[in-house]
Image (tube, rainbow, N blue to C red):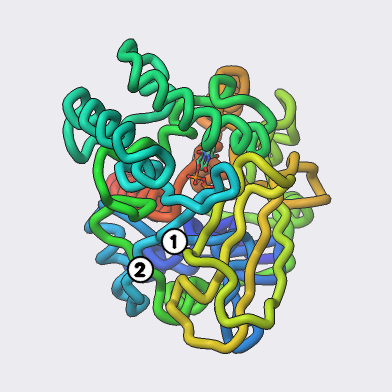
Amino acid sequence: MSKIKNLIVGCGLSGIVLAERIASELNEEVLIIDKRDHIGGNCYDYKGQDDIIIHKYGPHAFHTKYKEVWDYLSKFTSWHYFTLKSQIVIDNEKVTLPFNINTIYEVFPEYLATKISKKLINTYGYNKKIPILELKNSKDKDLKFLAEYVYKKIFEQYTVKQWGVTPEEIDKSVTSRVPVLVSKDNGYFQDKYQAIPLQGYTKMMNCILDNPLIKVQLNTDFKDIRDNVKYDKLFYSGAIDEFFNYEFGALPYRSLYFDIQEKNVEYYQNTAITNYPNNYDFTRISEYKYFLDQKTSKTTIAIEYPQEFEDGKNERYYPIANDSNLELYEKYLQKSKNLSNVYFFGRLGDYKYYNMDETIKRALDLFKKVKENNVTTN
Ligand code: UDP
């Protein structure tokens, strides 16, 4: 194999965006490889029955506050504007998630709901977002009651299913992703830009890769070629512990299993996602036709089961943020700094629970750094 100018490992969102930037802006050749047989990493989607677009690795609703990321993607796709709506089953009833003032009125008698929402508004202010672990510290009797209720009914068992530990045993940034909202906004996210690529994520990512300087090679595991491949620069979005042969031990991940089922009904549920915190072994059911508002006579759902990640058996989905894992990651990070011309990025390369937009932002920022270095070294 001749020397490659830029080798990118991992054809997920981060690798794809970086490949495009290098090819378009630096006019350099890029080889991007992936061990899977498709592009897109966990953002990959495909057409199922009735052409419903299925997110193979679980529901992906794009949302960002970064104009830069929105403008970047908008060069490669048109959008279906979409605000994710979710429900959660509490005591056998489906109610609004995230837990907000509407949910308070759905679960409590009116006099109590009015009392609690007034307290919430007076204490925190309208439109504020309160992480559940923060609300739990409240000294006020009514807010304490509310916090205990939300903790028990929404967070405790869901988190145990999802992560294998209680909310206290995982970094607080995880449960803060779904705060209690002091508002009547039923959207799952509050970002300025929220939409789904009109023809799906895979189509958008193929458009990003559509550059004669980019060569994509699937079914190619870096492990198998690393001894024979030569490159000027390596951009690695695979798992950082695997890159270093697990020298300090394996970084733990959570995985998921999706039971994708076709249903012979027009709609299966009221919203794109329903959460099941307290019953069953699964956490969520997603109904895919909602994401692009596809009008079909049948529907397709995905039932989501959290699992432990086991190499070779399932895929890495979530880095598990806690003190000991972050300490372990730090060792790999320090080691990575000794390498020149090797860059780590992406959810697995950085061991960070990035959302799609954060992963893109990270790739765009990495590119800026690479470009600057090019200018100073050339
Ligand atoms: N969470 C929960 N109950 C819910 C929704 C979320 O306990 O009904 C907690 C849980 O720990 C979860 C985290 O909040 O892992 C983040 O949820 P999010 O919906 O952001 O997870 P993702 O969509 O990234 O899997």
In the picture, measured across the screen, residue 218 lies left or right of residue 155, that is: right
Which residue is farthest right?
313
* Up/down of 277 relative to 216, above or below: above
- Residue occupying the point 35% across, 51% down: 189
Q: CA distance from mark 2 to mark 1?
A: 8 Å
Picture coordinates of residue 172, whole percent (x, y) = 46, 26
Res 339 seen here? yes
Q: What amino acid is labelled 1 in the image?
A: Ala
Q: Secondary structure at mark 2?
A: loop
Q: Nearest the camera: 139 or 320?
A: 139
Residue annotated with mark 1? 61
Picture coordinates of residue 95, whole percent (x, y) = 46, 50
In the picture, measured across the screen, residue 106 lies left or right of residue 223, that is: left
Marks 2 and 1: CB-CB under 8 Å?
A: yes
- Which numbered marker is on residue 304? none
Q: Nearest the camera: 45 or 243?
A: 45
Q: Nearest the camera: 11 or 52?
A: 52
Which residue is farthest top?
139
In the picture, measured across the screen, residue 141 lies left or right of residue 199, that is: left
Q: Nearest the camera: 374 or 210?
A: 210
- Which numbered marker is on residue 82? 2
* Up/down of 29 relative to 230, above or below: below
- Residue occupying the point 61% across, 88% down: 50
In the picture, measured across the screen, residue 360 lies left or right of residue 333, that is: left
Q: Which numbered disc, 2 or 1, marks the residue that appears first in the sequence?
A: 1
- Residue occupying the point 67% across, 59% down: 303
- Residue occupying the point 70% across, 54% down: 222
In the rendered image, which quarter is residue 170 located in?
top right
